Every structure is written in structure tokens, then in C-alpha cells.
Image: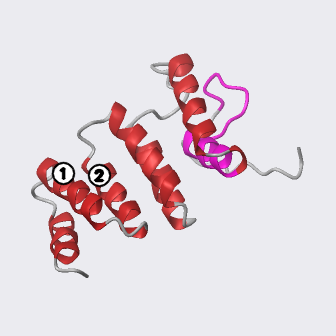
Amino acid sequence: MAAELTNVQCVTCHRGVAIPKQLVTIMTETAAKEGVNKAIAQYQDLRKQYFGAQAYDFTDVTLFNAANASLTANKPDDAIAFAQLNLSYHANSARSYQVLAQAYQRKMDKDKAIQSLEKAVELDPMNQGFKNQLQQLKAGA
């Protein structure tokens, strides 16, 4: 449709799929139109169909970016769902725990935010940003 524009970037090509969109765009559009549960089911279906085919980026970047986009759109529940799905595939993604903490903070769930940030620091102990966020959160900032 002429009304729908696809943002083409250097990582964009058809890669064997009919619609040349980045996976994060597909996820955020589906979540906006049909809800996060539909987006998660769609991700899982695409992963089953295309994993290993270099059709989509199934690294932790895609769902991390979807979680961040959800936070920016003030949808912390969607951010939590995307981050948790990402962690189910990439259990050592410290940044997914960090974005999870931000989403819990947005929902005023300080305990879960602290737990998530503690896990992020455990996985990436050299990340001073994570440590600073955890210290501020524990101090009540």
C-alpha cells in the first residue's frame, strides 16, 4: 500500500521473505495493532520458520530494541513481555535485565526492578552504568 512506508536501511533486504521489514519493526507494529501477545506469538512463529536462514535478526538485539521502543511508548507491560521473551532465548542478556528493571520501575515495582538490575550487574559486573542505576534505585532515587 502506498500509505505504508517501509524504512529501508543497510541491513534491509528481502532475505527470502515477502515483506522486507526488520523484525523489530514487525514486532512493534503487531504489538501496537494487535497486542503484545500476538507479537510474541508472531516472533515465535517467525523464529521457527526462519531461524538460521539469515532472514531476520534473532539475536538479543531485536527483542531488546522492541522492549526499549515499548518503554519509549510508555507501555511497560509490553516492554516486560519482550524482555522476558528475549531472556527465554538469551538468558545471559544483561541489557535485557536492565530494560526489564526500567519497565518495573515505570510500574512502581521497586523490588522487581532491583532484582532485575542485580541480575544485570551479576551478568555484566564491569558495567558501571548498571551498578550506578542499581545504587540509585536502592537509595530511593
User: Is residue 9 placed above or below 53 in the rendered structure?
Assistant: below
Nearest to the observer: residue 121 or residue 141? 141
Quadrant location, the N terminus: top right
Quadrant location, the C terminus: bottom left
SS for dot 1: helix
Disc 1 crowd rating (10 Å Cα; few below 14, some 14-19, many 20+) is many
- Amino acid carrying label 2: it is Tyr
Q: Which color scheme is applied?
A: secondary structure
Earlier sequence position, callout 2 versus callout 1 = 2
52 part of magenta stretch? no
- Amino acid carrying label 1: it is Lys
User: Is residue 19 placed above or below 5 in the rendered structure?
Assistant: above
Give x and y (percent) for residue 11.
54, 42
Residue at screen point 70% across, 44% down: 34
Q: Give the residue pinned by disc 1.
A: 119
Quadrant in the rendering for residue 116? bottom left
* Tags 2 and 1 touching, CB below 8 Å: yes
SS for dot 2: helix
Give x and y (percent) for residue 16.
64, 22
User: Is residue 106 placed above or below 98 in the rendered structure?
Assistant: below
Q: Give the residue pinned by disc 2.
A: 97
Residue at screen point 28% across, 58% down: 112
Magenta segment boundaries in residue numbering: 14-32
Taking the image as shown, residue 86 lies to the left or right of residue 36, namely: left
Residue at screen point 53% across, 58% down: 70
